[in-house]
Image: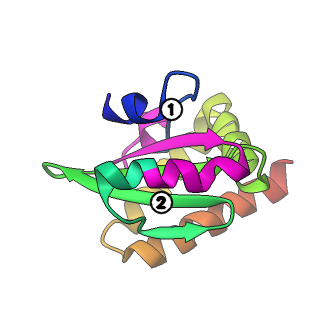
Amino acid sequence: MKIQQIIGNKIHVLERGSTRLKVSGKDEIDIFIPVLKNEIPKFCTELEKIYGPARSKYENRARFGSKNGSTRIEVFIVDKDSEDFKNINKFEDYLLKDGKALKKFEEFKIKLNGRSTKNYYAEKISYLNKILKINF
């Protein structure tokens, strides 16, 4: 894997989202690279060699993207200690343990198909926060 060669074997590369959950999605693969917050700029520089400039960059994360045929690949460098990353893990772990909740989430994601990226993520984050508020 190109990413692993660039960042080295000591950093874990994680599949997240629909790929991890094995549900229908937006025909994309979400890859998360959890690192220490102070390492984000270094890894961004390395990923820019593969993907070009980050599509979005914040204090605790950056997002890169590319396409492989019709499949979109989203690569996120994230602060492994951030609440956002911890919440994504809680949310996905919850869905993997609760088949009904996972099915509802899949139906929700299917309804979002065709939305702009900005709208899609806003709706998805709202859904995630609602589930976290109810269950944690």
Report the residue that reaches farthest toward the top. 9
Is residue 97 among what the camera can see? Answer: yes
Left/right of residue 132 with respect to residue 14 in the rendered view: right
Q: Measured from the top left, where is residue 7 in percent x and y?
A: 47, 34
Report the residue that reaches farthest toward the right. 136
Asked if marks 1 and 2 touch (Cβ < 8 Å), the reply is: no
Q: Measured from the top left, where is residue 120 in percent x and y?
A: 46, 70
Q: What element carries label 2?
A: strand
Region rendered in magenta: 18-45
Q: Residue at x 49, y 70 (%)?
A: 56
Q: Is residue 23 above or below residue 122?
A: above
Q: Which dot marks residue 49?
A: none
Q: Nearer the viewer, residue 45 or 134?
A: 45
Q: What residue type is labelled 2?
A: Arg
Q: Is residue 127 above or below residue 79?
A: below
Label 2: few (<14), some (14–19) or many (≥20) C-alpha neighbours in 10 Å = many
Is residue 26 among what the camera can see? Answer: no
Residue 132 sits in quarter: bottom right
Q: Measured from the top left, where is residue 131 in percent x and y?
A: 73, 55
Q: Distance between the residues labelled 1 and 2?
A: 14 Å
Q: Is mark 1 on a helix, strand or loop?
A: loop
Q: Residue at x 72, y 51 (%)?
A: 37
Q: Nearer the viewer, residue 104 or 127?
A: 127
Report the residue that reaches farthest toward the left. 69
Q: Which of 92 and 108 is in front in this view?
A: 92
Q: Name the residue under label 2.
A: 63
Please identify the quadrant where the N terminus is shown. Answer: top left
Q: Name the residue under label 1.
A: 13
Residue 20 lies in the magenta-colored region: yes
Residue 102 lies in the magenta-colored region: no
Q: Residue at x 38, y 28 (%)?
A: 5
Q: What residue type is labelled 1?
A: Val
